Image (cartoon, rainbow, N blue to C red):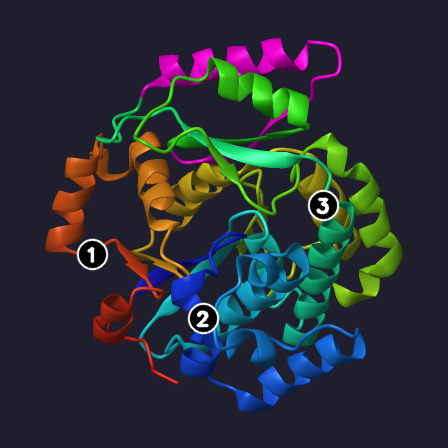
Amino acid sequence: MKAVVICPGRGTYNKTELGYLQRYFPDAALLSRLDDQRRCAAQPTLTELDQAARFSIARHTRGDNASALIFAATLGDFLSIDRSAIDIVAVTGNSMGWYSALACAGALSPHDGFRVANTMGTLMQRSLIGGQLIYPFVGEDWHPQPERREALIDAVEDIASRPGHALFVSIELGGMLVLAGNEAGLSAFEAVAEPTQQRFPLRLGNHAAFHTRLMAPVAEQGRDALPASLFGNPVLPLIDGRGAIWWPGATDRDALYAYTLGTQVTETYDFTRAITIAAREFAPDLFIITGPGTTLGGAVAQSLILSGWRNMASKDDFRAIQTTQPLLMSMGIPEQRASSTGFREA
């Protein structure tokens, strides 16, 4: 069975994920080495965070802690996939999940991938420039509404043109837009956006203005802290946040480094495009979303609908396919993890 693996980003290690590494991480020696890296940086270890008596929003969702936990959970799930049953044809990720994807695809070693994710998460937390919010342009039926999206883009551009207002499209996330900017820009959007689905527009706690030019100082700090020598050729095809494919044996290390610690940090991350390219170029039987969390499935399905994959045009169309022959599996859902052929429990 051919599969594309998708690595989740920030906001996916929450209260229900507490203990995820203890339950699922398959390599105790590797986890110990990652703990040592955190210990050397005078940071709480993954084991301490994951095995805490209770989940703390203030502690566990901080960029320096959340990025480390999410990377480790993703890597552990990737290592748990039975490669004799699952042929992984490509790897991609959402936002911070790009760092995880680099390690899963072999462009970074597990140790160096953790170093990159932990360093960037720490730098983001120290700066904490701006913020993010999320807002949908599709209804609850997930039917594409391009005119609605265009109206939202017009509103973003109008707000961004005002003195003192910064607002950008941070992530194209299926049927949703993740917007980022300064407080003036975010508040102005909240003032004009019609409340919908009982929770949007939704501010994302402990998130900075990721994937915008406001992050240029953080990108520069990342390049100062992380050498290009950490990077190498992937062993699996990698699909980035523009939909570009980095091929094994044909990847320029310096270009990959420049994208990862430059473009990827300061420009819109088009996750929708990445999923579209994954479907059209690799035609997988299955999309596997690693843990932690269970929140990325909707965005993947919406991205496939927006791309017209298998003639899907709505949530009902996706459900019909998913019911008869599962197209999407989430390792963060215990039932799917346990019942999906090819997954080994730790």
Tag nearer the camera, 2 or 3 = 2
Q: Residue at x 40, y 36 (%)?
A: 174
Q: Return the residue nearer the eye: 22 or 330.
A: 22
Distance (Cα) linking label 3 and label 1: 34 Å
Distance (Cα) linking label 2 and label 3: 32 Å
| Labels 3 and 1: the sequence-earlier one | 3
Q: Secondary structure at mark 2?
A: loop
* Residue 86 pos. (x, y %): 34, 71
Camera sees residue 336:
yes
135 lies left or right of 236: left
Provide the residue designation for mark 2. Answer: 18
- Which residue, as the protein is rendered here, is positioned at the far right? 224
Tag nearer the camera, 2 or 1 = 2
- Give, as a single range, the part of the protein colored magenta: 145-174
- Any mark on residue 326, and which? 1
* Residue 128 pos. (x, y %): 72, 44
Rate crowding at label 3 as few (under 14), some (14 to 19) or many (20 or more) other CA atoms within 10 Å: some
| Labels 2 and 1: the sequence-earlier one | 2
Q: Return the residue nearer the eye: 39 or 5.
A: 39
Q: Secondary structure at mark 1?
A: loop
Q: Residue at x 45, y 17 (%)?
A: 193
Asked if the residue under mark 1 is in contact with the one under mark 2, i.e. CB atoms within 8 Å, the reply is no
Q: Quadrant of the N terminus?
A: bottom left
- Any mark on residue 285, and which? none
| 290 in relation to 11, above or below | below
Provide the residue designation for mark 3. Answer: 259
| Labels 2 and 3: the sequence-earlier one | 2
Q: Secondary structure at mark 3?
A: helix
Rate crowding at label 2 as few (under 14), some (14 to 19) or many (20 or more) other CA atoms within 10 Å: many
**Circle 3: residue type:** Tyr
| 85 in relation to 213, above or below | below
